[in-house]
Image (spheres, helix red, strand yellow):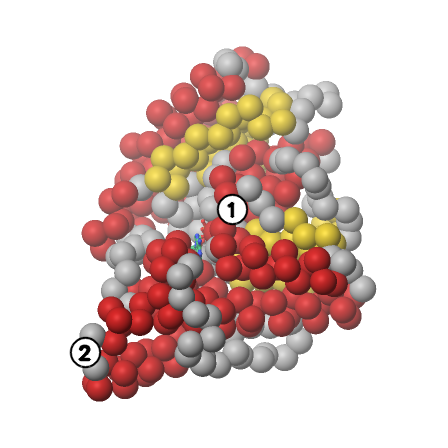
Amino acid sequence: MTEPTILAIESSCDETAAAVIRGGRVLSNIIATQAVHEQYGGVVPELASRAHQQNIIPVVTQALIKANVTKSDLNAVAFTRGPGLLGALLVGCTFAKSFALGLGIPLIEVNHMQAHILAHFIDDPKPAFPFLCLTVSGGHTQVVLIKSHLEMEVIGQTTDDAVGEAFDKTAKMLGLPYPGGPMLDKAAATGNPRAFDFPVSNMPGYDFSFSGIKTAVLYFLKNQTKQNPEFVQEHLADICASVQYTLIQTLLRKLKQASKDLGIKEVAIAGGVSANSGLRQTLQEYAKKHNWNVYIPAFQYCTDNAGMIAIAAHYQYLAGDFSNQLASPDPRMKI
Ligand code: KG4
Ligand code: ZN
């Protein structure tokens, strides 16, 4: 079977998503975003689990209808095993297991971070192996060496906060609403990235650290608002642009080093923070100057979605990599 039809489910954090893929082509990609967390300024795990339970049947139903596929057309069901929130993962895992059992079809467990990277194989152009991927999300910051669809090696990662967390936490300090990353990106658009200096961390090898910049911004704001209580309102765009610039420089320093050391000019970005306009632009400019082939996912495949789970499941199906009814979520699943 070279044209498997697979239903894929994603429920690792606060998006309930389902997609159908056939022969490697995504036929539908449905996402229900959970608005309930906005009032708390961050994802509340228990509320996420409950919302997944409410959303999962309508989302799966819509994904099948949009793809014009019935349950009997399915060759397999895939789900995100981890990493993510345990209670949230449990909803997708349990649903997928029941679905597979009821239909008598195989189950495929997908690693969410691998799936972010494999999202590059949904549309053209596709990266050639080996390539490097900077995987940047709310929970992870990694430099990954991808040798084949299913062979990946993490060669660098954050030693503390993820870069998405750094975006979200500084946005919160600036009084921007949740989710902070996209808001900070928007506010940065009209600011001067060199207006204020924040430290670019330099960890050994290809590792990162983002806790220093968070603290630096906190003390900077405390100092400035002591002298001028209106400081943030008056300089919001410049502060956002400067923070964003620093975070991007911190990320690119390691990516450049890895590219140089390994002699690899095929470079991709993946994960929620790859939606950041500053990162996308800086990477494209650098690529032009240094002859990199860069791969930047379409916006719909940057943040959490089930299309990426579906493409990962497609390659796992072809490789015969199936799970079984003993499967359970792994909140700390590694690449
Ligand atoms: O991959 P993702 O949707 O979920 C996780 O697996 O974590 O990533 C979410 C992260 C959040 O921290 C969010 O603020 C960040 O991606 N993000 C952005 C942008 N869009 C999403 N950060 C900066 N600029 C953006 N435009
Ligand atoms: Zn993600």
* Number of the front mark, 1 or 2: 2
The foreground one among 86 and 279 is 279
User: Which amino acid type is shown beneath numbered disc 2?
Assistant: Pro
State the quadrant of the N terminus. Answer: top right
User: Which amino acid type is shown beneath numbered disc 1?
Assistant: Cys
Tell me the SS state at disc 1.
loop
Tell me the SS state at disc 2.
loop
Q: Residues within 10 Å of mark 1 (few under 14, many from 20)?
A: many
Residue 104 occupies quadrant: top right
| Residue marked by disc 2 | 229
The foreground one among 75 and 231 is 231
Name the N-terminal-most of marks 1 and 2.
Answer: 2
Q: Horizontally, is 202 left or right of 239 in the view? A: right
Query: Taking 323 as reference, is 159 above or below it?
Result: below
**Label 1 near ligand 1 (CB < 8 Å):** yes
Residue 225 occupies quadrant: bottom left
**Whether residue 293 can be seen here:** yes
Residue found 53% across the figure and 53% down from its top: 274
Q: CA distance from mark 1 to mark 2?
A: 37 Å
Q: Horizontally, is 79 left or right of 132 in the view? A: left
Residue found 49% across the figure and 72% down from its top: 246
| Residue marked by disc 1 | 302
Q: Which mark is residue 319?
A: none
Q: Horizontally, is 158 left or right of 295 in the view? A: left
Residue 182 occupies quadrant: bottom left
Residue 275: percent from the left, percent from the top? Answer: 49, 51
Residue 162: percent from the left, percent from the top? Answer: 47, 65
Residue 206: percent from the left, percent from the top? Answer: 64, 71
**Whether residue 110 can be seen here:** no
The foreground one among 92 and 30 is 30
